[in-house]
Image (cartoon, rainbow, N blue to C red):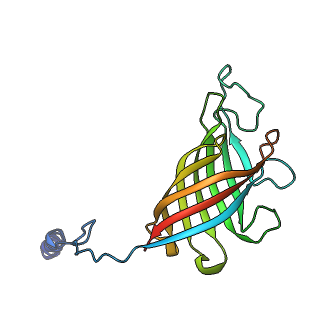
Amino acid sequence: MKGRLVLTWLLIVGVAATSVKSDYYSDSVPHEPKREKETHLHFFIHDIITGKNPTALKVAQANLTGIDTNPTGPTPFGSTFVVDDPLTTGPDPTSEVIGNAQGAYVSSSQGKDVVLVLYLDFGFTTGKFNGSSISVFSRNPITEPERELAVVGGRGKFRMARGFAKLKTYSVNPTLGNAVVEYHVTVLHY
């Protein structure tokens, strides 16, 4: 019995004394910069809030009274929408679909100007950039004729992307809130 006790004690001490390397990081290595590429993209998104097949759905709205100046408008203050808008090569809904804009936007202005803060991931499903995407996150004052959004990242062929998107509303139904928006995007990536 005494032998087993000594053996057990030696096993415990031996296991406790064994060192284990478990760093949460790896050793740093010198960075080998790659040549940065510049890509220009042109497409349209179709943001449809109404009808049988909406591509943007309101999932939340403010529960406060007296804040919203137009609570029955298409994008009242505090409203949050999720989006799965088609990306097309032209403004017509029957144009070739090249991907989807998926994400969310929030109506964030209490004034008369409609401002959305949006996050969208533009995922491409055809052509040279099939399987790649760019991400934008920015303030979008939709009543201005031309706007600019920040490209903050990407994946696939757009890994580590940065850049900007110039956009303008091609057409809009102010009563329903449905819109077609033209995008000209400049992307820097590796």
Left or right: residue 113 versus residue 157 is right
Left or right: residue 145 versus residue 178 is left
In percent of width and height, residue 31 lies at: 26, 74
In percent of width and height, residue 11 lies at: 17, 74
The number of numbered badges drawn on the structure is: 0
Who is closer to the viewer here, 101 or 111? 111
Q: Most extreme residue toward the front, as rendered? A: 145
Could you tell me which residue is drawn at 82 percent across and 47 percent down? 50
Q: Quadrant of the N terminus?
A: bottom left
Check the image and report above or below for 141 versus 26: above
Who is closer to the viewer here, 92 or 82? 92
Q: Most extreme residue toward the top, as rendered? A: 66
Who is closer to the viewer here, 21 or 180? 180
In percent of width and height, residue 17 lies at: 13, 70
Q: Quadrant of the C terminus?
A: bottom left
Could you tell me which residue is drawn at 79 percent across and 40 percent down? 174
Could you tell me which residue is drawn at 86 percent across and 50 percent down? 51
Q: Most extreme residue toward the right, as rendered? A: 52
Quarter of the image holding residue 116?
Answer: top right
Check the image and report above or below for 111 versus 88: above
Could you tell me which residue is drawn at 22 percent across and 75 percent down? 30
Who is closer to the viewer here, 82 or 39? 39
